[in-house]
Amino acid sequence: MKILNLALLGTAALVAASITARADDLATLKAQMDAISPVADAPIAAPTASIAWSGYVRAAIETTYDTTRAAGNQYATDIVTRAKLKVVGKTDTAVGQVGVEIQMRAVDNENSFATNVGNGVLQTDGYYGWWKLTPNLTLSAGNANPIKKGTLASNTFSFDFNCACYYADDPWGAIVNAPQVKTPLENSSKANPAQIGLTYADGPLTVAMAVEDSNNSGNNSAIGGSAKALYKTDSFGVDLSGGYWGNAAAAGVASWGVSAGAGVNFAPFKLGASVGVGNSGNFLVPAFDYTVATAYALVNIGDSAALEVGAVHDFGTAGSDVRAGATEYMAGLYYNPVKQLTLGAEGSFQSGGRADQSYTAALVTVFRF
């Protein structure tokens, strides 16, 4: 009997020891799981995305006098309008920021002298996508780039690049789908080339290059390219730009252009000048050599008004250059009581060239969101 009792006691002791050991193991396992749990429950970081919308509607009462039109039809007064919608979306991904900027505009009777034609035309007004391969290096594609809208060959310190110029911009015009007809001092979305480019930016220094379609036309090989070296601080800047567009001008002649510009900023003044030389033309306009210079002065008047004056001169002599020998003077005075509203008056006058003594004057209103 004593032996049986001792056996039972021994078995109970072994069971108790086993239970205690397992309890210790469970307690240890639970502590380990509790330690791991916050890590397991931590959410996986999602890409940071943002979308920003902006836009405007603007209108002007515009009076023009164009000496190139037939007698009796040289004067015209019209109400010209434009609306623009801009959306910018970007996402910070595991391989760098990826983004898209798209601008669409509706134009009703703008840059024409006919009567109001109705509902207007919807057009693109600059669009591109980009990928930041590194914080300094960006790959982009579209008909614009991170530096500006249009070809890189346009100079940052031309008057057209810096002015508001709501209706006095691009005074000498541009031929659609022929960016090479423009000088490297002009900045207009009317003839933006399709392009793929790389931009390197580090502080005040920016270097960029792009491959461009010289005429934005299918089944017509006309590949070109442009490049820019820009150094710009808050008070001073220098821009060297150029482009070459193969088989873009008449009879398969290549177009090219180079420019240099500089500007200073000492409040309330901004001053700048640039000069460009090259060969221009397209399949409609015979190629010609040109030399064009531009200068401007922008003045902030208090916190809510601004004055802009500028001039462009074409030193060319070619008969196919409608701007040869011409000087265009432009000025604008704008009142901005709030950032959503602009009221202004602007105008341009041409001396020399085929449109000698022509002018444009406009009263402008701009509404923004």
Image (cartoon, grey):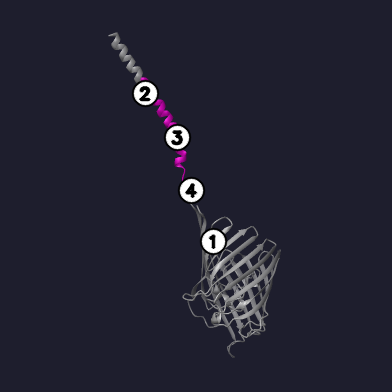
Image location (x, y in percent) of residue 1: 27, 9
- Disc 3: which residue: 34
Q: Secondary structure at mark 3?
A: helix
- Disc 4: which residue: 45
Range of residues picked out in magenta: 16-44
Question: Going from the N terminus, do you reach mark 2 or mark 1 first?
Answer: 2
The residue at the point 49 percent across, 80 percent down is 117
Question: Going from the N terminus, do you reach mark 3 or mark 4 first?
Answer: 3
Image location (x, y in percent) of residue 352: 67, 84
Q: Secondary structure at mark 2?
A: helix
- Disc 2: which residue: 19
Can residue 224 be seen from the camera position used here? Answer: yes
Q: Secondary structure at mark 1?
A: strand
Distance Cα–Cα, label 1 vs label 4: 25 Å
Image location (x, y in percent) of residue 40: 44, 41
- In the orientation shown, which residue stands out farthest toward the left? 1
| Callout 2–callout 1 Cβ contact below 8 Å | no
Considering depth in this image, is 305 or 34 the residue closer to the camera? 34
- Disc 1: which residue: 139
